[in-house]
Image (cartoon, grey):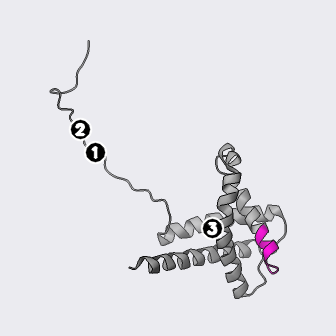
Amino acid sequence: MNPQVQKSVRFLQSWIINTVAVLLTVIILRNHISYGDKLGNLLVASFLLGILNAFVRPILLLIALPLLIFTLGLFTLVINALLLCLLQVLLPFFKVDSFGYAFLGALIISVISVALNVITGTARVSVKRRPPEPPKNSGGGNGPVIDV
């Protein structure tokens, strides 16, 4: 497959996963996070959230690096919640009741995104189990040396 087409397919797949994650989060927190009940609004919100994740999030992660190290990466959820709050500022139809619900929404979006990426096979991390390698002979003797 052409690398350009492959990038486009990965982008669309990522956008669909992000859209489903935002939709399920809005359904779970239906009275606290909303997008205006139009499919176009949901698509725009998830697209803009993807752009914010691609460009703004790395800058925030770099600025908050000491906090990320101190909290063993859990501060990432605070950054994701800040991005949801920023999305509310940028889009008049996207509403989040409070920072607490933005934090809970960021947690739900993260869990759903990871689950969907694992299910679709697009996860960046994979775990493979290989059988152990046979021990290598150093060639210096006939076997192990026992020193008495």
Q: Which residue is mark 1?
A: 133
Query: How many angstroms separate mark 1 from mark 3 (CA)?
Result: 40 Å
Mark in front: 1 vs 3: 3
Q: Nearer the viewer, residue 3 or 53?
A: 3
Q: Amino acid at mark 3?
A: Ala
Question: Which residue is depicted at the point 25% across and 42% down?
Answer: 134
Q: Which mark is residue 14?
A: none
Mark 3 or 2: the one toward you: 3
Q: Quadrant of residue 80?
A: bottom right
Count of numbered badges drawn on the protein: 3
User: Residue at image x 82%, y 79%?
Assistant: 92
The location of residue 27, given as percent across then percent down, is 72, 76
Report the side of 72 relative to 103 (left or right): left
Which corner quadrant holds the C terminus? top left
* Outermost residue, right side: 97
Q: Is residue 92 magenta?
A: yes
**Which segment is the magenta one?**
86-94
Q: Residue furthest top?
A: 148
Q: Which residue is mark 3?
A: 54
Q: CA distance from mark 3 to mark 2?
A: 45 Å
Q: Verify CB contact (< 8 Å) between mark 1 and mark 2.
A: yes
User: Which of the numbered marks, if any, corresponds to residue 136?
Assistant: 2
Which SS class for mark 2? loop
